[in-house]
Amino acid sequence: MTSMPKPFIDKHLPKNELGLTVRNYEGSMSTLCAGCGHDSVTAALVQAFWELNLAPESAAKVSGIGCSSKTTAYFMGQSHGINCVHGRMPSVATGANAVNGDLHYIGISGDGDSLSIGFGQFAHAIRRNLNMLYIIENNGVYGLTKGQFSASADIGSKSKKGVANEQTPIDPCVQALTLGAGFVARAFSGDKSQLVPLVKAALMHKGFAMIDVISPCVTFNDHAGSTKSYAHTYKYYHPLVHTDFVAHAEEITGEYAEDGAMRVTLHDGGELRLRKTDSDYDPRDKAQAIETLMMNDGGGEIRTGLLYLNEDMPDMHAANHLPKTPLNQLPYEALNPGKAALASLQKRYR
Amino acid sequence: MKDLVETASEVRVNDFVLKIANVNGTGSASANGLLMKAIFRMGVPVVGKNLFPSNIQGLPTWYEIRLTKDAYMARSGTAEFMVAMNAETYKQDLAEVSPGGFLLYDSTWPRPDLHARQDVTAIGVPLARMCNEVFENARTRVLMKNMAYVGAVAGLTGLDVEVIKELVTEMFGTKEHLITANMKAINLGLDYVREHFPDPLPLKVERMDATAGHIMIDGNTAAALGCVYAGATFGAWYPITPSTSLMDGFKSFCEKFRVDKDTGEKNFCIIQGEDELASVGMAIGAGWNGARSFTPTSGPGISLMSEFIGFAYYGEVPVVLFDVQRAGPSTGLPTRTQQCDLTLAAYASHGDTKHILVFPANPKECFEMAIQSFDLAERFQTPVFFMTDLDIGMNDWMVPELDWDDSYQPDRGKVLSKDELEAIEKFYRYEDRDGDGITYRSLPGVHPKGAYFTRGSGHNWKGGYTEDSDEYKEVVDRLVRKWKSAADAVPGPIIRRCDGPARRAIISVGGCDGAVIEAMDQLSAQGVNLNYLRVRGFPFNAEVEAFIAAHDEVFVVEQNRDAQLRTLLVNETDAPKDKLVPVLDYAGMAANPKFIVEGISAYLDALGDAA
């Protein structure tokens, strides 16, 4: 993962409640190709974290292998990151999260990392309702190994050499819905106004929050015939739900505000306001969400936004009755039963 | 009864093997455990070995109880008294009885074949018939048949029925009807043999005072207890024989000691992973985040975990792996024991990797070395392998009571606190500030100055990505220095010297210990005097090297086909290869002294020499 430091100039930038500018949330210089969709996701993460007034060190960044996984070095250089083995980020995140749930876990993955080699771990992290933001930077292609189709490539989508993909694609949103994720969103790296509030909402959601971001690969999958190109995505891009995150919401008086937005209070504070762009779409209706996504199979409209939300499911910490004090901060005295207990216990082995 | 005494060759008090042949899934385990515990309670040292199939119900299973007044730790490999409860294995079971031995069978049906051997006395007790007459439903009858043979064995050997009753009472607690029913079955067997075989057998159980201060415990349970006392808070696992009972044990001890009675909060987290890859990944994630974490598994699991093990090695993340070894390769013999993952664990993962290993020999060492493993993992910031096996892990061993020193404090290694991070000018994760190869680490969320990037890709001493040859080499060279320095921190070898000078010696490891000690006694009686070193940690320390140098030849005794311990000795010491003579047993059974005595004798005979 090549990286270089960025020049640090923040004189005239606005400061958040912690007195920090967005520059305090940046990482080292990206080494991805110019125009890569992933860099836009990185920028959205920086913006969202800054806007939420979260301390940079309160993030824990986890990733696997691939172009997407490299990006954890490009934001929040003041937080810990772990760039583990291919497709296994969810397990590292699970263990890390179990012993300290106070941090904001940000997992960055790709369509290869999550839908092929790491498909099993992706599924089981959802089943455990791990409290984390899980972003898939989805470009339908393997970049670092120079252009092979990934498992998210649509049937008929053409490679740079003109070969059409014949295998059925795996849709991470449909998978996440059927596996029981409580926060499922799709976004496009080219629309920051949609992505930033979604990232904020996902960070504040207590549970597994997945955002599948269509993030075109300018080098290997941005040509005519590709269904993951910028041109194709702009053309078929269709937001279903508009999401706003409000950090300090006034008291809720009714589920729908005057503007028709649905209000949702999150367990970790703040409020979501979901505005429908299609009158018949309800982000509370899982069956409808799945139907809507599956209808598009084969490269039709790319329906985006917060597709499904259920903020009331117990996360892994709750399910395991973990203590308020993180396990990694418990004093040894609280863990060791001592000499007398050992002597007493051994009566059963006499 | 007269004919019984005539065929018996000798009177053996507290020195014979009682072997029970059963069908698995018939509830025989508790009856056999009861017999062993009763003998133990009578003060007689015992060795118990459960030989079971990889199956849930219907296949043959055996339980061996060796009464050993001399307190040997291994199997003897003989069977003086066979309780043949499985018609399918009658032939084999009869053949296995030592000359002059006894065989007890269920005489509800005539079994003339069981009387075929002139040198074995077959004792028929109509167990099924008696239980059918007394007990109602089918399952109860099957279960009670087991208790009935417990009574018969007690009557024939002099095992104290009062001790059995005491154990049955403890087993069922307040369930009075179960105590009554089980004692009724036991008395059926007891009364029958007292009536029909009034003279006791020459195989006798007599009270001794050789088990005081001891317990009977299996190694997985003891290791689990070690995890609790070490302060481990996170365990991830995927079920695999023979390691499963380790996590079962950890869970049950944590439920007992680590749950807040008022809030129900649990000061531990156990996650059953979707596979071994995920399990070790979780343990590594928890270790990275500063918790003591572990994963129990067996050989196939280590194979799957290998990529992640290399990551933790290179990224310097502490984690403890319990490898309860079973016979390989591939699925192998899941319910048979071997020491066949030694080289796998020592060098697990691609690229240049070397790991720290500890080798317990019995459940007491499982408890102690589990704690040491966590200290080593955090001190050296690396994966540590706890190398046990099915025999140690799943069989009940008689060991001295576990002891605990309340002044123990865990060695958490070089972890910078918030204040320390605040005070230093700049933090670099892999900066060797102390020159000992062990660098300082910081934990996520503690201080923005402590932030760094843990990566499995090439990195320099600052923690930054690098493809520069010198920067890359600097880190991997430090890693091997760090690994070598662990030689003096791992549990040291135990040396047992014979009386007088010895030119030759044995080096062995783990659960072979009992068999080696017994073999040394037998060889010594034949005039072959050997010294013995038991390796307890890897990398090997200078004592191992010196011990090899001090002898002309060293027999390396271990349980695998490929002489893996010998391979490690050849690789990691300066010992000349031809000085290390392999003595191997890889049949999958718990070690007995026979292969050692025979292996060494054959070697010496070929030389025409004695030690």
Image (cartoon, rainbow, N blue to C red):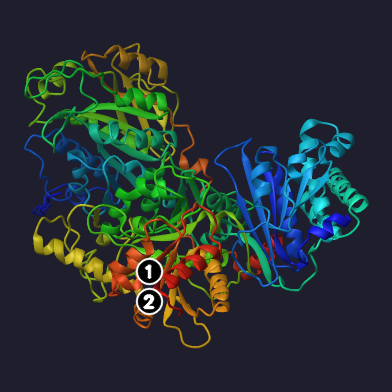
List x then y, in percent, for residue A306: 32, 25
List x then y, in percent, for residue A207: 41, 37
**Is A206 left, or right, of A318 in this rendering?**
left
In contact (CB < 8 Å): disc 1 and disc 2: yes
Q: Residue at x 23, y 25 (%)?
A: A152
Q: What residue type is labelled 1?
A: Val
The chain ID associated with circle 2 is: B
Residue labelled with disc 2: B553
Can the viewer see residue B230? no
Q: Which residue lies furthest to the right in this view?
A: B195
Please, what secondary structure does the residue beneath circle 1 have? strand
Q: In this view, does B535 lie above or below A208?
A: below
The chain ID associated with circle 1 is: B
Quarter holding the N terminus of chain B?
bottom right
Q: In this view, does B588 lie above or below A161?
A: below
Residue labelled with disc 1: B581
Q: In this view, does B547 lie above or below A256?
A: below
Q: What residue type is labelled 2?
A: Glu
**Is B161 left, or right, of B419 in this rendering?**
right
Quarter where residue B452 is shown: bottom left
What distance separates the C-alpha of mark 1 from that of mark 2? 7 Å
* Label 2 Cα crowd, 10 Å radius (few <14 / some 14-19 / many 20+): some
List x then y, in percent, for residue B545: 34, 78
For residue B422, which numbered disc appears in the image? none
Q: How many labels does the image show?
A: 2
**Is B588 left, or right, of B345 in this rendering?**
right
* Residue closer to the observer: A190 or A216: A216
Please, what secondary structure does the residue beneath circle 2 have? strand
Marks 1 and 2 belong to one chain = yes
Quarter holding the C terminus of chain B?
bottom left
List x then y, in percent, for residue B23: 67, 40
